[in-house]
Image (cartoon, rainbow, N blue to C red):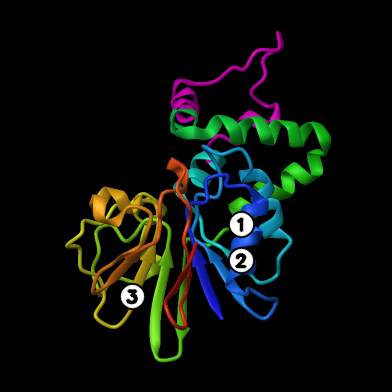
Amino acid sequence: MTYVISDLHGWPVKNVLALLQRAGFSDEDVLYVLGDVIDRGKEGIELLRWMAAQPNVRFIMGNHESMMCACAFLFTGEKVSPNGELALTEDELLMVYNWLGNGGRPTLEAFVDLIGQSVEEAQKVLDYIRKAALFARVRVADRKFILVHGGLDNFSADRALEDYAPEELVWARPEIDTKYYDDATVIFGHTPTLFYGEEYRGRPVYTDTWICIDAGAAAGLCPVLLRLEDMKEFY
Protein backbone atom coordinates (compact mmCIF):
# COMPACT_ATOMS: atom_id res chain seq x y z
CA MET A 1 0.00 0.00 0.00
CA THR A 2 1.05 3.59 -0.64
CA TYR A 3 0.44 6.33 1.92
CA VAL A 4 1.01 10.09 1.87
CA ILE A 5 1.09 12.64 4.68
CA SER A 6 2.25 16.23 4.86
CA ASP A 7 3.01 19.16 7.15
CA LEU A 8 3.53 17.35 10.43
CA HIS A 9 5.29 20.43 11.85
CA GLY A 10 6.88 18.73 14.83
CA TRP A 11 3.85 16.60 15.68
CA PRO A 12 4.80 14.12 18.45
CA VAL A 13 6.51 11.02 17.11
CA LYS A 14 4.30 8.76 19.25
CA ASN A 15 1.21 10.28 17.60
CA VAL A 16 2.63 9.69 14.12
CA LEU A 17 3.35 6.05 14.99
CA ALA A 18 -0.15 5.62 16.43
CA LEU A 19 -1.68 7.05 13.25
CA LEU A 20 0.34 4.66 11.09
CA GLN A 21 -0.67 1.77 13.31
CA ARG A 22 -4.34 2.71 12.93
CA ALA A 23 -3.94 2.56 9.17
CA GLY A 24 -2.28 -0.84 9.33
CA PHE A 25 1.00 0.50 7.91
CA SER A 26 3.60 -2.28 7.60
CA ASP A 27 7.13 -2.89 6.35
CA GLU A 28 5.67 -3.85 2.96
CA ASP A 29 4.01 -0.44 2.56
CA VAL A 30 5.52 2.88 1.48
CA LEU A 31 4.99 6.24 3.15
CA TYR A 32 5.63 9.53 1.35
CA VAL A 33 6.08 12.53 3.65
CA LEU A 34 5.48 15.70 1.65
CA GLY A 35 7.64 18.12 3.57
CA ASP A 36 7.37 20.50 6.52
CA VAL A 37 8.22 17.85 9.08
CA ILE A 38 9.89 20.52 11.20
CA ASP A 39 9.08 23.90 12.84
CA ARG A 40 6.31 25.17 15.08
CA GLY A 41 6.11 21.88 17.03
CA LYS A 42 8.96 20.52 19.15
CA GLU A 43 9.61 17.06 17.69
CA GLY A 44 10.52 17.79 14.08
CA ILE A 45 14.15 16.72 14.45
CA GLU A 46 13.12 13.47 16.15
CA LEU A 47 10.61 12.86 13.36
CA LEU A 48 13.35 13.31 10.76
CA ARG A 49 15.61 10.92 12.64
CA TRP A 50 12.84 8.33 12.73
CA MET A 51 12.11 8.80 9.02
CA ALA A 52 15.77 8.46 8.08
CA ALA A 53 15.88 5.08 9.81
CA GLN A 54 12.89 3.70 7.87
CA PRO A 55 13.72 2.12 4.49
CA ASN A 56 10.10 2.45 3.35
CA VAL A 57 9.69 6.17 4.06
CA ARG A 58 10.26 8.66 1.23
CA PHE A 59 10.89 12.29 2.10
CA ILE A 60 9.90 15.23 -0.13
CA MET A 61 11.46 18.63 0.63
CA GLY A 62 9.23 21.29 2.17
CA ASN A 63 9.74 25.02 2.41
CA HIS A 64 10.55 24.77 6.13
CA GLU A 65 13.32 22.25 5.48
CA SER A 66 14.53 24.53 2.70
CA MET A 67 14.69 27.46 5.13
CA MET A 68 16.65 25.37 7.64
CA CYS A 69 19.15 24.33 4.97
CA ALA A 70 19.59 27.96 3.95
CA CYS A 71 20.53 28.73 7.56
CA ALA A 72 22.99 25.83 7.94
CA PHE A 73 25.80 28.37 8.50
CA LEU A 74 24.40 28.70 12.05
CA PHE A 75 25.62 25.19 12.88
CA THR A 76 29.10 25.07 11.36
CA GLY A 77 30.93 27.59 13.55
CA GLU A 78 32.35 29.32 10.47
CA LYS A 79 30.35 32.48 11.20
CA VAL A 80 31.63 32.89 14.76
CA SER A 81 33.87 35.94 15.17
CA PRO A 82 37.01 35.92 17.37
CA ASN A 83 35.01 37.47 20.23
CA GLY A 84 32.51 34.59 20.10
CA GLU A 85 29.67 36.43 18.42
CA LEU A 86 27.91 35.44 15.20
CA ALA A 87 29.17 37.55 12.30
CA LEU A 88 26.40 37.38 9.72
CA THR A 89 25.82 39.35 6.57
CA GLU A 90 22.59 41.25 6.06
CA ASP A 91 21.32 38.53 3.70
CA GLU A 92 22.16 35.83 6.23
CA LEU A 93 20.35 37.71 8.98
CA LEU A 94 17.28 38.00 6.76
CA MET A 95 17.34 34.23 6.14
CA VAL A 96 17.54 33.55 9.89
CA TYR A 97 14.74 36.02 10.69
CA ASN A 98 12.62 34.45 7.94
CA TRP A 99 13.12 30.95 9.34
CA LEU A 100 12.58 31.89 12.98
CA GLY A 101 9.62 34.07 12.05
CA ASN A 102 8.03 31.05 10.40
CA GLY A 103 8.23 28.87 13.50
CA GLY A 104 11.81 27.67 13.29
CA ARG A 105 12.86 28.33 16.88
CA PRO A 106 11.80 24.90 18.31
CA THR A 107 13.71 23.19 15.49
CA LEU A 108 16.79 25.35 16.01
CA GLU A 109 16.79 24.61 19.74
CA ALA A 110 16.31 20.87 19.18
CA PHE A 111 19.06 20.76 16.58
CA VAL A 112 21.51 22.64 18.80
CA ASP A 113 20.72 20.16 21.59
CA LEU A 114 21.45 17.29 19.18
CA ILE A 115 24.76 18.88 18.20
CA GLY A 116 25.62 18.96 21.90
CA GLN A 117 24.89 15.23 22.12
CA SER A 118 26.48 14.15 18.86
CA VAL A 119 27.82 16.28 16.03
CA GLU A 120 27.78 13.17 13.83
CA GLU A 121 24.07 12.52 14.42
CA ALA A 122 23.25 16.16 13.78
CA GLN A 123 25.17 16.06 10.51
CA LYS A 124 23.20 12.95 9.48
CA VAL A 125 19.96 14.88 9.95
CA LEU A 126 21.22 17.80 7.88
CA ASP A 127 22.44 15.45 5.15
CA TYR A 128 19.08 13.67 5.13
CA ILE A 129 17.25 16.96 4.59
CA ARG A 130 19.63 18.05 1.84
CA LYS A 131 19.12 14.77 -0.03
CA ALA A 132 15.31 15.03 0.02
CA ALA A 133 13.61 14.85 -3.36
CA LEU A 134 11.63 17.81 -4.66
CA PHE A 135 8.88 15.61 -6.12
CA ALA A 136 7.95 12.00 -6.79
CA ARG A 137 6.00 10.27 -9.52
CA VAL A 138 3.86 7.40 -8.24
CA ARG A 139 1.60 4.98 -10.10
CA VAL A 140 -1.05 3.07 -8.17
CA ALA A 141 -2.99 0.59 -10.31
CA ASP A 142 -4.07 2.64 -13.34
CA ARG A 143 -3.83 6.03 -11.63
CA LYS A 144 -0.84 8.38 -11.77
CA PHE A 145 0.12 10.80 -8.99
CA ILE A 146 2.69 13.56 -8.67
CA LEU A 147 3.71 14.21 -5.07
CA VAL A 148 5.19 17.58 -4.16
CA HIS A 149 5.19 19.90 -1.16
CA GLY A 150 3.56 23.08 -2.40
CA GLY A 151 2.23 22.53 -5.89
CA LEU A 152 3.52 23.62 -9.31
CA ASP A 153 4.04 27.34 -9.80
CA ASN A 154 4.10 28.63 -13.39
CA PHE A 155 2.52 25.36 -14.43
CA SER A 156 2.50 24.04 -17.97
CA ALA A 157 1.49 20.51 -18.88
CA ASP A 158 4.35 20.47 -21.38
CA ARG A 159 6.95 21.45 -18.79
CA ALA A 160 9.09 18.66 -17.32
CA LEU A 161 9.03 18.41 -13.54
CA GLU A 162 12.82 18.50 -13.56
CA ASP A 163 12.65 22.00 -15.10
CA TYR A 164 10.87 23.56 -12.10
CA ALA A 165 13.00 25.61 -9.74
CA PRO A 166 12.90 24.42 -6.10
CA GLU A 167 10.98 27.51 -4.98
CA GLU A 168 8.29 26.79 -7.59
CA LEU A 169 7.67 23.43 -5.91
CA VAL A 170 8.07 24.18 -2.19
CA TRP A 171 6.43 27.64 -2.04
CA ALA A 172 3.56 27.24 -4.53
CA ARG A 173 0.02 28.00 -3.33
CA PRO A 174 -2.55 26.83 -5.88
CA GLU A 175 -5.91 28.55 -6.02
CA ILE A 176 -9.05 26.46 -5.63
CA ASP A 177 -9.64 26.75 -9.40
CA THR A 178 -6.05 25.91 -10.40
CA LYS A 179 -5.93 23.17 -13.03
CA TYR A 180 -3.04 20.76 -13.43
CA TYR A 181 -2.71 17.59 -15.53
CA ASP A 182 -5.51 15.71 -17.28
CA ASP A 183 -3.83 12.34 -16.74
CA ALA A 184 -2.24 12.66 -13.28
CA THR A 185 -3.35 13.93 -9.87
CA VAL A 186 -1.03 16.30 -8.03
CA ILE A 187 -0.96 15.80 -4.25
CA PHE A 188 0.57 18.50 -2.08
CA GLY A 189 0.49 20.16 1.35
CA HIS A 190 1.91 23.55 2.37
CA THR A 191 -1.41 25.42 2.17
CA PRO A 192 -3.63 24.51 5.15
CA THR A 193 -6.92 23.33 3.72
CA LEU A 194 -8.80 25.80 5.93
CA PHE A 195 -7.44 28.54 3.65
CA TYR A 196 -9.72 27.21 0.92
CA GLY A 197 -12.80 27.62 3.10
CA GLU A 198 -14.16 26.81 6.54
CA GLU A 199 -15.84 23.72 5.10
CA TYR A 200 -12.38 22.19 4.58
CA ARG A 201 -11.21 22.57 8.17
CA GLY A 202 -9.18 19.53 9.21
CA ARG A 203 -9.72 17.51 6.03
CA PRO A 204 -8.26 17.30 2.51
CA VAL A 205 -9.41 19.33 -0.46
CA TYR A 206 -10.16 17.34 -3.62
CA THR A 207 -10.43 18.91 -7.06
CA ASP A 208 -10.43 17.43 -10.55
CA THR A 209 -6.65 17.69 -10.87
CA TRP A 210 -5.19 18.05 -7.37
CA ILE A 211 -5.54 17.11 -3.70
CA CYS A 212 -4.30 19.22 -0.80
CA ILE A 213 -3.58 17.21 2.36
CA ASP A 214 -2.28 19.86 4.79
CA ALA A 215 -5.10 19.43 7.29
CA GLY A 216 -3.63 21.94 9.74
CA ALA A 217 -1.32 20.18 12.19
CA ALA A 218 0.62 23.46 12.54
CA ALA A 219 -2.54 24.99 14.01
CA GLY A 220 -3.22 22.12 16.39
CA LEU A 221 -5.45 20.03 14.12
CA CYS A 222 -4.77 16.39 13.31
CA PRO A 223 -2.80 15.61 10.15
CA VAL A 224 -4.43 13.34 7.61
CA LEU A 225 -2.85 10.13 6.29
CA LEU A 226 -4.13 9.24 2.82
CA ARG A 227 -3.92 5.75 1.30
CA LEU A 228 -3.73 5.99 -2.47
CA GLU A 229 -5.06 2.54 -3.35
CA ASP A 230 -8.56 3.33 -2.09
CA MET A 231 -8.22 7.05 -1.15
CA LYS A 232 -9.11 6.23 2.45
CA GLU A 233 -8.29 8.91 5.01
CA PHE A 234 -6.92 8.17 8.48
CA TYR A 235 -6.88 10.60 11.42
Is residue 230 rendered magenta in the image? no
Q: Which mark is residue 16?
A: 1
Q: Which is nearer the eye, 137 or 201?
A: 201
Residue 71 appears left or right of 53: left
The answer to whether 170 appears left or right of 196 in the picture is right
Quadrant in which residue 112 is drawn? top right
Please say whether residue 86 is one of the residues in the magenta stretch: yes
Image quadrant containing the N terminus: bottom right
The answer to whether mark 1 and mark 2 are in CB contact below 8 A is yes
As helix, strand or loop, the secondary structure at mark 3 comes to strand
Residue type, mark 3 in image: Thr
Q: Amino acid at mark 1?
A: Val
The percent position of residue 53, horizontal first and vertical second, equals 74, 61
Residue located farthest toward the bottom when viewing the structure as drawn? 142
In this orientation, does residue 10 appear? yes
Residue sitting at 64 percent across and 60 percent down? 18
Task: Give the percent coordinates (x, y) of residue 213.
Answer: 40, 61
- Which label's residue is closer to the chain start, 3 or 1? 1
Secondary structure at badge 2 equals: helix
Asked which quadrant contains residue 21, the reply is bottom right
Image spot of residue 51 (x, y percent):
66, 59
How far apart, in angstroms, are the residues tagged by discs 2 and 3? 23 Å
Residue beneath disc 3: 185
**The magenta stretch spans which residues?**
70-97
